[in-house]
Image: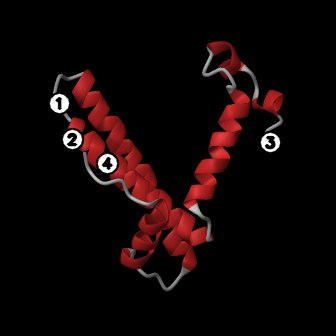
């Protein structure tokens, strides 16, 4: 089993190695387009694996990692703690699915959960 990574250390690592931009809008556009591209690569590898019979599981794994890198870069851009964001997401989902996922709850409008 491989060593697990501390998210705070990972976020600092991303900040250290990320490209430095002169203009903030160029930075966030790069991270936003990057995460979109990597997520598209994840989808493409899944399609190739399951629809074409071309095993791309290693590509899925690699692109999930790249997507996560961009998530950390976006958090750094806004000064957000990635662990806090994950915690907030967990709390939201606990409220939404207290007994676990159900199709009925998934069909409810977000307004039903008090979300904006």
Residue displayed at 64% across by 44% down: 89
Q: CA distance from mark 2 to mark 4?
A: 9 Å
In this rendering, would 53 be left or right of 78? left
Residue displayed at 62% across by 16% down: 102
Q: CA distance from mark 3 to mark 2?
A: 37 Å
In this rendering, would 24 be left or right of 31? right
| Vertical arrangement, residue 13 with respect to residue 41, above or below | below
Q: CA distance from mark 1 to mark 4?
A: 14 Å
| Vertical arrangement, residue 89 with respect to residue 96, above or below | below
Residue displayed at 36% across by 53% down: 4
Please provide percent x and percent y for residue 69.
40, 59
Please provide percent x and percent y for residue 115.
79, 39
Provide the residue designation for mark 2. Answer: 58
Q: Which callout, 1 or 4, points at the residue further toward the start of the chain?
A: 1
In this rendering, would 18 be left or right of 113? left
Between residue 110 and residue 9, name the one nearer to us. 9
Residue displayed at 69% across by 25% down: 98
Q: CA distance from mark 2 to mark 1?
A: 8 Å
- Pointer 2 with pointer 1, Cβ within 8 A: yes
Foreground mark, 3 or 2, reads 2
Residue at the left extreme, as displayed: 54
Q: Which callout, 3 or 2, points at the residue further toward the start of the chain?
A: 2
Provide the residue designation for mark 4. Answer: 63
Provide the residue designation for mark 1. Answer: 55
Please provide percent x and percent y for residue 63.
31, 48
- Pointer 2 with pointer 4, Cβ within 8 A: no
Provide the residue designation for mark 3. Answer: 116
Callout 2: helix, strand or loop? helix
Q: Which callout, 2 or 4, points at the residue further toward the start of the chain?
A: 2
Q: Residues within 10 Å of mark 3 (few under 14, many from 20)?
A: few
Q: Residues within 10 Å of mark 4 (few under 14, many from 20)?
A: many
């Amino acid at each position: 089993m491989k060593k697990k990574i501390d998210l705070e250390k990972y976020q600092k690592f991303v900040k250290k190695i990320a490209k430095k931009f002169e203009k903030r809008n160029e930075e966030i556009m790069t991270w936003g387009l990057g995460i979109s591209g990597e997520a598209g690569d994840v989808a493409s590898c899944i399609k190739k694996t399951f629809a074409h019979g071309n095993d791309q599981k290693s590509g899925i794994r690699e692109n999930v990692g790249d997507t996560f890198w961009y998530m950390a870069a976006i958090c750094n851009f806004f000064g957000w703690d990635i662990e806090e964001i994950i915690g907030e997401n967990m709390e939201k989902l606990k409220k939404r699915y207290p007994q676990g996922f159900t199709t009925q709850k998934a069909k409810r409008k977000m307004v039903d959960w008090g979300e904006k």
